[in-house]
Amino acid sequence: MTELTTTTADGLQVTVRMPDNHAWVRESLEKACAAEARRQLADTPAPDPAYSVPRAADLLDLHPETLRDYMRLPDHHPRRLHYMPGESSRGDRVLLSQIHDWQRRNRTDAALIAPAGPRTRGRRPPAQ
């Protein structure tokens, strides 16, 4: 027997027992679980990865010192790249959302950078 339990908005708990041998029971459960997982993922805030200055410069195809020059501009300047200061300049981090905001303000025709996937150790493929 499969037992489904839910609680209504009024606090009423409803339990339904169904036999396991029906394919529609399994399909219904899978669909309900998938829908709930999608809802929870949609409601969860997306992560905002932070990149070091050299990595952010690489993503934007800029020299790191050029990127630092953008970071040193006054707060009100439209070309300023906002960042999270670290204990030293090596610890400065640029959030992906800040990179996207900077791109929108400065290069509206550029494609937005997607978050990088997990990095693997090993040799880099040869440049072509």
Image (cartoon, rainbow, N blue to C red):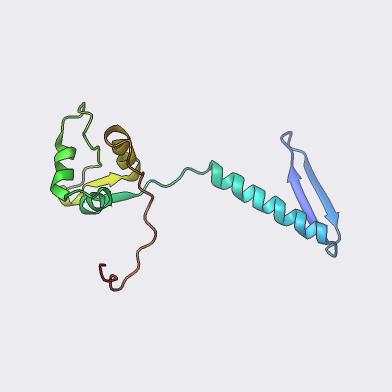
Q: Is residue 36 above or below residue 71?
A: below
Residue at image point 61% right, 50% down = 37
Q: Is residue 77 visible?
A: yes
Q: For the view shown, which residue lies furthest in the front direction? A: 128
Q: Is residue 56 above or below residue 98?
A: below
Residue at image point 66% right, 48% down = 35
Left or right position of 30 against 84: right
Left or right position of 1 against 122: right
Pinpoint residue 99: horizontal percent, then vertical percent. 30, 42
Q: Quadrant of the N terminus?
A: bottom right
Q: Is residue 2 visible?
A: no
Pinpoint residue 98: horizontal percent, then vertical percent. 31, 39
Residue at image point 23% right, 37% down = 81
Residue at image point 14% right, 37% down = 72
Q: For the view shown, which residue lies furthest in the top direction? A: 76
The total of numbered circles placed on residues is 0
Left or right position of 16 against 43: right
Pinpoint residue 60: horizontal percent, then vertical percent. 26, 47
Q: Quadrant of the C terminus?
A: bottom left
